[in-house]
Image (cartoon, rainbow, N blue to C red):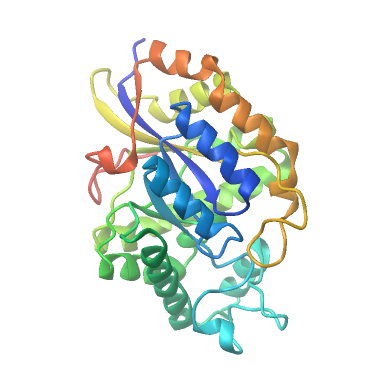
Amino acid sequence: MARPRVRLVVTADDFGYCPRRDEGIVEAFLAGTVTSVSLLVNGAAAESAAELARRYSIPTGLHANLSEGRPVGPARHGASTLLSPEGFFLGKMGFREAVAAGDVALPQVREELEAQLNCFRELLGRAPTHVDGHQHVHVLPGVCQVFAEALQAYGVRFTRLPLERGVGSCAWLEAPARAFACAVERDARAAVGPFSRHGLRWTDVFVGMSTCGRHMSAHRVSRALARALEGIPTGHALTAELMAHPGYPSVPPAGGCGEGPDAFSCSWERLHELRVLTAPTLRARFAQEGVQLCALDDLDSKGPGEGVPC
């Protein structure tokens, strides 16, 4: 059966994390597969990444970071519920645990988000095309509300709703990765209300958690899109986002957000994603299946409450 018509944004996360990651991301953009990037303004290579974005006219959004490295806002000057005693963010799971325990002061979250939005404007000379969350922190309970308020105040319309249909049944994912993906999915569902109330927009379909790292292949990306589109009548025009983390692996000590690069960024899996994204196979499959690649700011994305139910 023919699929609905799909306009697909391929977003490379972690732009600005290190020069090697950025080199690969630019390579994938110039190859025509990556169509958008999300910049870490507290990344070690944020300034050079911003220069690359300007040089190659790369559509660039903000990758809001509340979980890795050092802050850019007022928290860097003193004690904060966002930080460890050493002055770093609490980590991917540490931040989630602190939010769940009620230990994070949401006004401090708002201050940091505003500081990162201001930093982005200083680096690029404009507002971001979109704002999403590093390690999906933007959909956490409570955080999603102040996130939506901050974006509305800054006039940012587009975000990411990391709600991937069927990710819990992807047997190839290791148990911890599958559990994390399901937790993100639950948070994303709950974030729809705050996002909608503040006028944020997102694509109809999101994929990328089931195709991260070693699990990425042209076949799996295609199957993830097919799962997301099940039940949608042929002829409907839909928007979709593929989240990716390509690049040449980081080599310590270069990179990171103030603590050096993590294992995720140093992994060969970053290069694997780059190879999949730049190989002709994936683009050929997209063409065969009628998937049109585009940038997020090219989309007439669905408005609040109009997304396709997953």
The answer to whether residue 173 is visible is no
Q: Tell me which corner region of the image, top left, top right, bottom left or bottom right, holds residue 126.
A: bottom left
Whether residue 134 sits left or right of residue 18 in the image: it is left
Q: Does 152 appear above or below 239? A: below
Q: Residue furthest bottom?
A: 78
Q: Does 49 appear above or below 222? A: below
- Residue appearing at x 40%, y 52% in the figure: 61
The answer to whether residue 193 is visible is yes
Residue 263 location (% of width, % of height): 75, 50
Whether residue 71 sits left or right of residue 193 in the image: it is right
Q: Dividing the image into 4 quarters, which one contains the C terminus?
A: top left
- Residue appearing at x 72%, y 61% in the figure: 260
Q: Does 87 appear above or below 35? A: below
Residue 48 location (% of width, % of height): 52, 54
Q: Does 179 appear above or below 211? A: below
Q: Dividing the image into 4 quarters, which one contains the N terminus?
A: top left
Residue 120 location (% of width, % of height): 41, 63
- Residue appearing at x 46%, y 30% in the figure: 30
